[in-house]
Image (cartoon, helix red, strand yellow):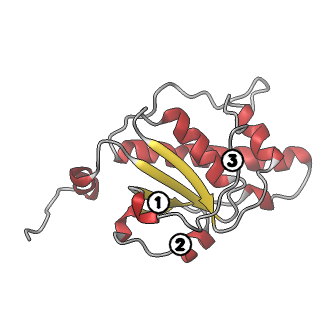
Amino acid sequence: MPTLRCATWTACWRSWVPDAVNVLFVCTANSCRSQMAEAWARRLFPAHWRAASAGLLVYPISERTRAVMREVGLSLADHHPKSIDGLDLDAFDLVVTLSADAGRYLPELREPARHWRRPFTDPMGAVGTEQEMLDAFRTGRQRALAIVQEILGAFGGGSGAEPVSTSDDDGHN
């Protein structure tokens, strides 16, 4: 079998990536980070791409998660928490873990390069005033958006289907 030689990792990746990309976002409880990423992906991915989310375990989706996503016009009304149990992880073109635990405990994929580790702070752990906690969720929302945009760039999907405004009417980001 010939050795694949490419100028960059992304060039090699693109040489074997399918036209339709199927992405799974995984975090610890599928109640915040992975739900945010799935919502952004559904909004920004090309129509023929697919996004899903799951957790190592499941908790109800946080009302703060729902609220900060509504601020940018994304509803989580049809979302519900799901577990990775029973999922064929190798059926996904890319599995993106958004928590250190998910990265650590995700079963190994047949092709480990399809596992991207992109952990970020869990907004569910925020403490302080209601405003401070909402700000932590907004920060998480922006991090999830950045990861989805990174995937779009790596897989040749552009920067998204439409411009994204991440400020709500009160000027929150």
Are there few (<14), some (14-19), or many (20+) residues within 10 Å of tag 2? some
Residue 129 vertical placement versus 106 (above, below): above
Towards the viewer: 141 or 39: 39
Residue 32 vertical placement versus 28 (above, below): above
Towards the viewer: 33 or 90: 90
Residue bearing mark 2: 106
Q: Mark 2 falls on what kind of element?
A: loop
Badge 1 amino acid: Val
Q: Residue furthest left?
A: 2
Quadrant for the N terminus in the image: bottom left
Q: Mark 1 falls on what kind of element?
A: strand
Kindly check if marks 2 and 1 are in contact, taking CB atoms under 8 A apart as contact: yes
C-alpha separation, residue under disc 2 versus residue under disc 1: 9 Å
Residue 66 figure quarter = top right
The dot on residue 95 is 1
Badge 3 amino acid: Thr
Which of disc 3 and disc 2 is earlier in sequence?
2
Picture coordinates of residue 154, whole percent (x, y): 35, 48
9 to the left or right of 24: left
Residue 173 figure quarter = top right
Residue bearing mark 3: 139
